Amino acid sequence: MSPAQGLAPAGPLFDGDFMEAVQRLRLIARRVAPRGRFAEQISRDRGSGLEFQDYRPYVPGDDLRAIDWNIYQRMGKVFVRLFDELEDLPVYLLPDVSGSLWLEDPPRVRAGLQAALALAAVALGQHDTVGLYPFAEDLRVVSRPKAGKGQLFPLAKRLEALEPGGQTDFRQSLQRFGALGLREGLMVIVSDFFDPGGLQALEEATRGLRHRLLLVQLLRQTDRNPQADWDGDLRLTDCESGAIENVSLTPAVLERYRQAYDRFASGLADLAKRRHAGLLALDADQPVVPQIAALFEQGRYTV
């Protein structure tokens, strides 16, 4: 299936209305300070930044320009001024492009790629760098981190050009990402998180990564509550592995399925909590930008 075939039923991926909404999202994010901002993150390193924090005694090798001579004149002791150094935050976008995300109408991948571009717009508007690393059975480097508002439209074209991959493999994909040796930043994984290895695969894959983490979960209401006309004997095909199962769908079977889905949802939330990660549940059937705007308007961006 080509991207055009997968995305055509709902129209262009990034039309004029969507790009206009993204520009408004930039303004919303800019009004929220300091919570919810990607850029100008406070560094752990003390340097010659913009915001004064404290004093400490001078030690050989300190920058002489940082000495507070007023204190020296009053107390006869040499102190240097300390500042919090403001630095850009690299944002690494990892959209899941596994084949299963392209199958629905409209395909779930549409919401995922729109979410990726919306978050990129905010980051670029705040002077951060943004890189693109789509994954499925493995991870690809499509665009290394770059800064500047002019990067938004080239990034949109790269997202539009993405094609379906195989089945989701977090272990392989995130191992490849970790091997890139990228500077510590914010890693945004956009996925339904249905890995054949379960949530354990995601937890193991993220365990050794030193980046801050934002999980954007692509979901639909029918994930937990399948279509009402599904009953009787069905032949189901696993959209990740292609495995076929014959199922007699009864109320008891549906209830066990819902319980299993609830365990998955709570397990993902628990994983995010253990990793001190942000978690955004994104309804693929609703407009994407307003859902992301709520992160900033309600102060719920917590990674």
Image (cartoon, rainbow, N blue to C red):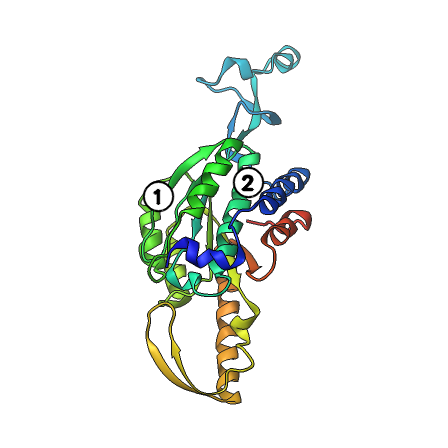
Q: Position of residue 296 (x, y in %)?
A: 64, 47
Q: Residue 141 got which mark?
A: 1
Q: Is residue 272 visible?
A: no
Answer with mark 2 or mark 1, whichever residue precedes in sequence.
2
**Is residue 164 found left or right of 8 in the rendered image?**
left
**Is residue 122 found left or right of 257 in the rendered image?**
right
Q: List the single residue furthest toward the top.
A: 73
Residue that mark 2 sits on: 121
Report the amino acid beneath label 1: Val
Q: Position of residue 200 (x, y in %)?
A: 39, 65
Report the amino acid beneath label 2: Ala
Badge 1 element? loop
In the figure, 140 relative to 34: above or below?
below
Q: Position of residue 58 (x, y in %)?
A: 51, 19
Counting the numbered discs, the total is: 2
Q: Is residue 240 visible?
A: yes
- What residue appears at the point 57 percent right and 26 percent down from the top-left corner? 83
